[in-house]
Image (tube, grey):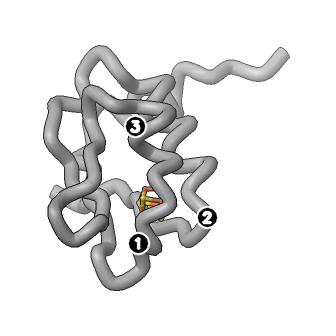
Amino acid sequence: MVDETPRDTEVLSGKVVVDREACMGSGNCVYWSPDVFQLDKDGIAAVIGDVAGHAERVRLAMTNCPTSAIRLAEN
Ligand code: SF4
């Protein structure tokens, strides 16, 4: 059995950032987690919401980003 709790905790406790240089504007993150990500006027993803309460969807957004542009920042 795989315990998902540690990764959930990691996402919840981390600050999510988008590497704007790496983002290609695919919108995958907006699809998976629209409460946390939106595309800005330049078509690049921006973090617009709190990660708390959206850990699973944020993780899906990170996993499905084609350029691995979504990262957890060090504090
Ligand atoms: S999924 Fe990745 S490449 Fe696509 S808009 Fe979001 S951050 Fe950018």
The kind of secondary structure element at disc 2 is loop
**Residue 75: x and y, percent?**
15, 56
Ligand 1 has an atom within 8 Å of the beta carbon of the residue at disc 2: yes
- If you read the primary sequence from the N terminus, does the residue marked by circle 1 or circle 3 appear first? 3
Residue wearing tag 3: 10
Q: Nearer the viewer, residue 3 or 44?
A: 44
Which amino acid is tagged 2?
Answer: Pro
Compared with 23, 37 (above or below) is above
Give me the C-alpha separation between circle 1 and circle 2: 9 Å
Residue wearing tag 1: 23
Query: Disc number at residue 66?
Result: 2
- If you read the primary sequence from the N terminus, does the residue marked by circle 1 or circle 2 appear first? 1
Crowd tier of the residue under label 3, counting other residues whose Cα lies within 10 Å: few below 14, some 14–19, many 20 or above: few
Residue at 34% across / 55% down in the picture?
72
Q: Nearer the viewer, mark 3 or mark 2?
A: 2
Residue at 77% across / 22% down in the picture?
2
Q: Nearer the viewer, residue 31 or 10?
A: 31
Query: Disc number at residue 73?
Result: none
Q: Where in the image, quadrant-wise, is ligand 1 located? A: bottom left
Q: In the drawing, does residue 57 fall left or right of residue 12? A: right
Ligand 1 has an atom within 8 Å of the beta carbon of the residue at disc 1: yes
Compared with 34, 42 (above or below) is below
The kind of secondary structure element at disc 3 is helix
Name, please, the residue furthest toward the right: 1
Q: Nearer the viewer, residue 24 or 47?
A: 24
**Residue 16: x and y, percent?**
28, 50
